[in-house]
Amino acid sequence: MNNDKVITADQLTKRFGDFTAVDAISFDVHKGEIFGFLGANGAGKTTAMRMLSGLSLPTSGKATVAGFDVYRQNEKIKQNIGYMSQKFSLYEDLTVKENIRFYAGIYGKSDKFIKEKTVFILKHLHLESETNKLVRSLPLGWKQKLAFSVAIFHEPQIVFLDEPTGGVDPVTRREFWNMIYEAAESGITVFVTTHYMDEAEYCSRISIMVDGRIDALDTPQQLKKTFNAASMDEVFLKLARKATRGE
Amino acid sequence: MNAVIVSNIIKRYGTKKAPVSALQGISFQVDKGEIFGIIGPDGAGKTSLFRILTTLLLADGGTATVDGFDIVKDYKTIRERVGYMPGRFSLYQDLTVKENLDFFATIFNTSIEENYDLVKDIYSQIEPFKNRRAGKLSGGMKQKLALSCALIHRPSVLFLDEPTTGVDAVSRKEFWEMLKRLKEQGITILVSTPYMDEAGLCDRVALLQSGKILSINTPQGVVNEFGKTLFAVKSNDMLHLLNDLKQNEDIEDAYPFGEYHHVIMKHGGENELKDYLRQTGRQYEMKEVRPDIEDCFIALMKN
């Protein structure tokens, strides 16, 4: 069981001056899990994600991601993860094909690999006829699906998704989650944040951050039982209302 | 009298060769004192519509009045009478909280004191930080300051463009409670949101998708229009359950919905669905449920 842990965090802490953004959080994420990372604005989610993706050094505590240490091997971490957010994902003024080529190139994939996989992905997304169109001209839903495919193009062990479905229509949002399931089935671990509480139900396990700490971590079913709540929305409100700090 | 009348508004962007239709002939009316929600995903046309109604953008076709005034001819009068909170934070980051509010009050020839009663409920929550620069505020506080600034001249119609986007569930609930209290003061509120669950908090809603209105009704009315029986099914393997459901030709639609999958039958009803689920050999739990706005939106999108 131990060696299928793709993320381990032990008392992971980040302070900015006298402000403790992330306060000694500990948790493990297993291979192929869809791990929902929830919390109110300002709870510390972004800071925690930045540490786990090798972009920010912790103040104290331990963590490994894809088997690499967040202090000493952050470049290795970056090579072994994928990342996508609502705000930044693709270059609008590059074509669909150019975006894929660019990202895959950054991760050092061979031309042959890129060529073959590009064909496969465009077919899977039904984007073959849009290959040479600027990403700018694609509808938001397509952009997000393409961005996700690009984020896992280099076959990372883990993909971090920061509010990937914000503002997306309800049909596309579900298609997007279908892609998340497919990725998880193929063995990619998914670490995802969302403000949609129905999406929390789709996760294998959920952690909820409040004031820099993880106040709850369990399966959605168990969390609802523990907090005597009918929905994840209710669980979230019960926990987040305890928060004492703003953003 | 209607606070807002919109008839056949059209807006296009892009070039003549490659036009992008943002609004394809939108019509609706908003009653005085109503909270009217424009519900739709990104790219539906919500912001274009709000910018046209607040006289910041010209439509390519159609007409509209706000508070009885024409959006083209009487644009100056409208600007005095509406409050507008754009989707992107648009206050002066390097002015303090109080300076921002003072600034907006002065532009409209009024003062904070004169209309304090109107903004008190909201502004008092950020008043302890009145000397802090707006750029240093948290997201929730910025939202409250922006709303205060949009209200300080006592507008008759308030336009709020996605005030709760990116805001967590707790702050969203608080925001809607503030809107309810503003409505009690007689202000008409047009509010847009991509969150379907907020539709229920409006008096009436227009569901907007790709520049077209799918439905205009009370939230209850939208649900009543659904017209089909909706089932919720769950099992211990939701992914494969969904695949099974999608393969059955008697099933019109099946999609994830929180901890359940929602299922609409093409032929037959509860018994047929139960029979099929039994055939798959899965343990399952099934019940009939009331559709909510998101179910309606999905059904309307697919039609």
Image (spheres, rainbow, N blue to C red):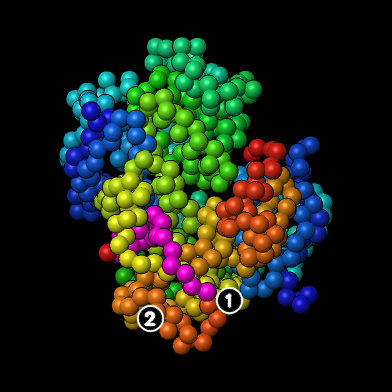
- In reply to whether residue B36 is colored magenta, the answer given is no
Residue A221 pos. (x, y %): 63, 65
- The residue that appears at 68% across and 56% down in the rendered structure is A227
Chain letter, disc 2 residue: B
- The residue that appears at 39% across and 75% down in the rendered structure is B270
Residue that badge 1 annotates:
B236
Is residue A196 among what the camera can see? yes
Foreground of the two, A71 or B231:
B231
Where B128 falls versus B163 (above or below)? Answer: above
Is residue A111 among what the camera can see? no
Left or right: residue B162 compared with residue A238 = left
Residue that badge 2 annotates:
B272
Mark 2 vs mark 1, CA separation in Å? 21 Å
Foreground of the two, B303 or A20:
B303
In the image, which residues are magenta? B285-302
Chain letter, disc 1 residue: B
> Do the dots labelled 2 and 1 sit on one chain?
yes
Dot 2 falls on a residue whose secondary structure is: helix
Dot 1 falls on a residue whose secondary structure is: loop
Crowding around mark 2 (Cα neighbors within 10 Å: few <14, some 14 to 19, many 20+) is some
Residue type pointed to by label 2: Glu
- The residue that appears at 40% across and 20% down in the rendered structure is B154
